[in-house]
Image (cartoon, rainbow, N blue to C red):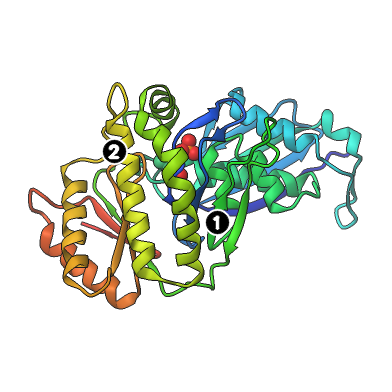
Amino acid sequence: EKTWVRMVTAQTPTNIAVIKYWGKRDETLILPVNDSISVTLDPAHLCTTTTVAVSPSFDQDRMWLNGKEISLSGGRYQNCLREIRARACDVQDEEKGIKIAKKDWEKLHVHVASYNNFPTAAGLASSAAGFACLVFALAKLMNAKEDNSELSAIARQGSGSACRSLFGGFVKWNMGKAEDGSDSLAVQLVDEKHWDELVIIIAVVSSRQKETSSTTGMRDSVETSLLLEHRAKEVVPKRTKQMEEAIKNRDFGSFAQLACADSNQFHAVCLDTCPPIFYMNDTSHRIISCVEKWNHSEETPQVAYTFDAGPNAVLIAHNRKAATQLLQRLLFCFPPNSDADLDSYVIGDKSILK
Ligand code: PMV
């Protein structure tokens, strides 16, 4: 019998939270304790490209990440595969003469090949782009009819932050109320054209992998941090509304003030956790001081900073002029080939390596 292969390739950028997700109320379904808001990077920068293939000749599901086979047995992969398979529809590819009936998807196996366009070891390529891309590509392969928000609720079960990478521009992840997680999904606030003068620069402080995984860190914070409880109940609901306003009005002053405050509170929660978690290091702190000093010397802030579960700084400049000045200031504070220099900068599609 003649065999065949059907393939789909997708590309998904990573996203950076400006109102952070930290803490799960349900670990299996990955339901958060608060809403979060992020900006999706340009696909040319930090992104994942994933090809998924199906063929009657495949005898098991398999996956390769950056060319190396990895196990699909983990619960997160299994949840994503199961949820998409449950939504698979008939496929008819006239050109290739392929016909797959809805019920065939139960027996068919997939192969997945995924690449990050940035060294995974840099501690930057987060799982966000990876799971978003996997879910999106599988949905296309299996002709699932769900829209991106519905797919985001599936990507969420791979990695929480992944749900925000199904859209470009600014994206909100609604924590939702339902126990089954059906309303814990991402929605686009504005598209990538809405505020396109922003320039995002990543200062790579250290290319080492983080020491505390976000899963362990969040669990410890939920169990031990009173500040996290206060943050989730009292701070984030208000701050999320203010951030949505700032984004809609392109109000950079408010945007920067809210983003910096939220990053700092997230890292304060980490310190408030038992045992305490240190994601930022001395260099991260010096970058904060450098930006704060500059912002306070101007009439309104020029740059926002935000740090995830690691020491690298994500710097969001108001415009090109502010980005140029920021680089000059960083080079002055962290002279190349000195004791205090940074590993690299990533600006747009260029990476300035020392
Ligand atoms: O989705 P995870 O488990 O990789 O957690 C991401 C957590 C932060 O990056 C620190 C914050 C966020 O909202 O992305």
Q: Which residue is mark 1?
A: 171
Q: Is residue 59 above or below residue 152?
A: above
Residue beneath the point at 40% across and 40% down: 231
Residue beneath the point at 21% across and 61% down: 291
Q: Secondary structure at mark 2?
A: helix
Q: Quadrant of residue 160?
A: top right
Residue 86, numbered circle: none
Q: Secondary structure at mark 1?
A: strand
Q: In the rendered structure, which amino acid carries the disc numbered 1?
A: Val
Question: Does the image show residue 14?
Answer: no
Residue beneath the point at 68% across and 50% down: 149
Residue 152: percent from left, percent from top: 64, 46
Residue 65: percent from left, percent from top: 52, 38
Locate the N terminus by quadrant: top right
Side (left or right) of 330 relative to 128 = left
Residue sticking out furthest to the front: 234
Q: Is mark 2 within 8 Å of ligand 1?
A: no
Q: In the rendered structure, which amino acid carries the disc numbered 2?
A: Ala
> CA–CA distance between discs 1 and 2?
24 Å
Q: Is mark 1 within 8 Å of ligand 1?
A: no
Residue beneath the point at 71% across and 42% down: 53
Residue 268, numbered circle: 2
Q: Is residue 200 above or below residue 118?
A: below
Residue 346: percent from left, percent from top: 33, 59
Ranked by sequence position, the earlier of labels 1 and 2 is: 1
Tag count in the figure?
2
Residue sticking out furthest to the left: 338
